[in-house]
């Protein structure tokens, strides 16, 4: 097993991340996905195909997971990881999952002498392709030092956020702030359009002042202004999932997160309108349907 990297989940983000690991690490990569096409593409680039998640775990020293939701992670954990894991192995979860579940996975692997590290990713699909993601890691400093060099093959910002689960907490809060910011941008664009200010000019001008943000330059300009809400992107359904994690953390802390609760309502209404599979800035259509003629 020495030196082998396993990779489970070759979706929109996982495939380019796996490709960067394959090209830059100099190690053999054992990959698995339920979908045949991305697996075939990554094998054509030099990876070895595994027949199951369990096969990946059995054949690898370090296993990366890049799965869409906690439900998918739980399925992989129970069906392939836990039965196959051995002492000395490390599993790195790149997805956004529930904090309590993350800590429970870490506890169960620790009983077998193995390690679970939460390392959720942020930024765009283009960043995944370019190897410029931001990764938020929950681990001890010693564990972090061992895995950081591998993570830097696909990320330019790698932050140790604290112990197990801290990476998930940080990513969940990142997304909560992002969702609320994108909603503010969509509202601003709608008001501008109805008040005689060209929306693109508005956001370009805001980008020069205190309202500037990553969300403005990406989700605002490239989605809301461009009216581009692709289906193979971070969907409203997935955004709702991540927001629910933030609200759960707020409930556990006894906090009343009114802004996040409002976002939940907006996402629910967007999903009810049949836009659950679309890139989540599609909430702009809910705010101002007249701005997006069919």
Image: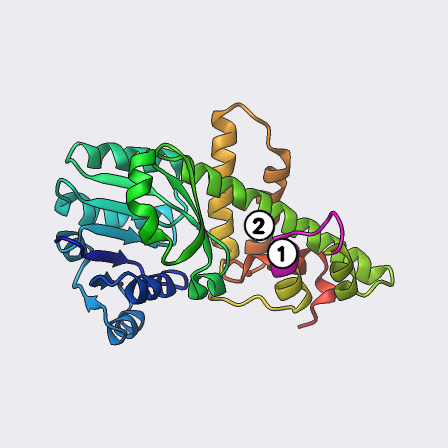
Q: Please report the bounds of the magenta region as a residue range.
A: 208-219
> What residue sits 28% from the left and 44% below the top?
146
> What residue sits 39% from the left and 43% below the top?
97
Instruction: Report how far apart the C-alphas of labels 1 and 2 lie in the structure.
Output: 7 Å
Figure check: 256 above or below 8: above
Q: Nearer the viewer, residue 143 or 268?
A: 143
Residue that mark 2 sits on? 267
Q: Nearer the viewer, residue 144 or 171?
A: 144
Figure check: 19 above or below 261: below
Residue 110: image tag: none
> What residue sits 25% from the left and 63% below the top?
26
Residue 214 located within the stretch drawn in magenta: yes
Residue reaching furthest to the top: 254
Label 1 close to label 2 by CB (< 8 Å): yes
Q: x, y percentage for residue 215?
A: 62, 54
Residue that mark 1 sits on? 283
Figure check: 192 above or below 181: below
> What residue sits 23% from the left and 72% below the top?
46
| Quarter of the image with the C terminus in it | bottom right
- Residue 64 relative to residue 253: left or right: left
């Amino acid at each position: 097993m020495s030196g082998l990297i396993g990779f489970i989940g070759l979706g929109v983000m996982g495939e380019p991340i796996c490709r960067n690991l394959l090209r830059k690490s100099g190690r053999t990569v054992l990959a698995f996905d339920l979908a045949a096409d991305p697996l075939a593409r990554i094998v054509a680039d030099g990876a070895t195909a595994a027949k199951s998640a369990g096969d990946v775990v059995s054949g690898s020293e370090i296993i990366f997971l890049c799965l869409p939701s906690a439900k998918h992670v739980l399925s992989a954990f129970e069906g392939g990881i836990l039965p196959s894991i051995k002492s000395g192995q490390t599993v790195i979860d790149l997805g956004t999952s529930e904090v309590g579940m993350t800590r429970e996975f870490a506890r169960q692997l620790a009983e077998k002498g193995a390690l679970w590290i939460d390392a959720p990713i942020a930024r765009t699909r283009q960043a995944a392709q370019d190897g410029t993601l931001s990764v938020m890691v929950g681990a001890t400093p010693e564990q972090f030092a061992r895995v950081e060099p591998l993570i830097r093959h696909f990320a330019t910002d790698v932050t140790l956020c604290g112990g197990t689960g801290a990476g998930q907490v940080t990513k969940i809060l990142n997304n909560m702030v992002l969702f609320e910011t994108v909603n503010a941008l969509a509202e601003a664009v709608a008001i501008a359009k109805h008040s005689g200010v060209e929306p693109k000019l508005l956001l370009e001008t805001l980008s020069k002042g205190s309202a500037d943000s990553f969300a403005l330059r990406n989700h605002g300009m490239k989605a809301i202004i461009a009216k581009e809400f692709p289906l193979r992107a971070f969907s409203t359904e997935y955004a709702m999932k991540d927001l629910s994690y933030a609200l759960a953390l707020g409930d556990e802390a006894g906090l009343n997160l009114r802004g996040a609760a409002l976002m939940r309502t907006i996402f629910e209404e967007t999903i009810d309108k049949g836009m659950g599979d679309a890139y989540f800035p599609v909430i702009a259509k809910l705010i101002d349907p007249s701005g997006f003629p069919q």
